[in-house]
Image: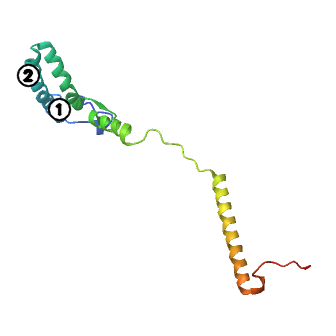
């Protein structure tokens, strides 16, 4: 007696109805619940069985595929959700932003020079306040 053992034990799913899992059976029932009203509506609208059958099967196919399609251990709705997030929620291209080091240094040097100049002016004003003779115009030494 031989018992097949799957290579990846985590990929094993219990079969409940025949060779189908509970998820596949639920998706099949939901697909039928989508297909039946669409079939009736399209049959009344177009009076053609071929067109109504095609449209109703196309409407129920995504629901049916969610139960059967599995890629890398994830079902179709998860894959679609990740694709939508990747496309709309997260940016695909990040803008290139660079700080120019030289302009930053130049700006800091200008600010430093301005601060030094203000300090010199304040020191000069303070000296002028202390020495009242220097306040006015400078006189020529010769005359």
Of residues 18 and 131, the one nearer the viewer is 131
Please tell me in which quadrant of the rendered image residue 3 appears. top left
Query: How far from the left and from the top, in percent, is residue 129?
Result: 70, 84
Q: What is the CA distance from the residue labelled 2 to the residue labelled 1?
A: 20 Å
As drawn, 90 above or below 60? below
The label number, if any, that marks residue 27 in the structure image? 1
For the residue labelled by badge 1, is the local secondary structure a helix, a strand or a loop?
helix
Is the N terminus in the top left, top right, bottom left or bottom right quadrant? top left
Q: Residue furthest right?
A: 142
For the residue carrying disc 1, how many other residues have a C-alpha within 10 Å: few (<14), some (14-19), or many (20+)?
A: some
Q: Residue 21 location, x and y as percent?
A: 18, 33
In this picture, residue 108 sits left or right of residue 37: right
Question: Could you tell me which residue is drawn at 70 percent across and 69 percent down?
Answer: 117
Residue at figure coordinates x 15%, y 22% from the top left: 56
Residue position for label 2 = 40
Query: Disc 2 on helix, strand or loop?
Result: helix
Which quadrant would residue 25 be assigned to in this image?
top left
């Amino acid at each position: 007696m031989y018992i097949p053992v799957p290579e990846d034990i985590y990929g094993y799913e219990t079969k409940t109805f025949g060779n189908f899992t509970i998820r596949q059976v639920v998706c099949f029932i939901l697909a039928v619940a989508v297909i039946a009203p669409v079939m009736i509506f399209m049959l009344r609208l177009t009076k053609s069985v071929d067109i109504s059958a095609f449209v109703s099967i196309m409407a129920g196919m995504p629901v049916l595929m969610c139960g059967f399609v599995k890629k890398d251990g994830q079902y179709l709705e998860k894959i679609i959700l990740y694709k939508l997030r990747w496309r709309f929620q997260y940016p695909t291209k990040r803008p290139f932003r660079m700080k120019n080091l030289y302009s930053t240094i130049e700006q800091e040097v200008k600010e430093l020079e301005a601060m030094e100049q203000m300090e010199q002016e304040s020191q000069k004003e303070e000296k002028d306040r202390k020495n009242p003779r220097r306040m006015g115009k400078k006189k020529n030494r010769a005359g």
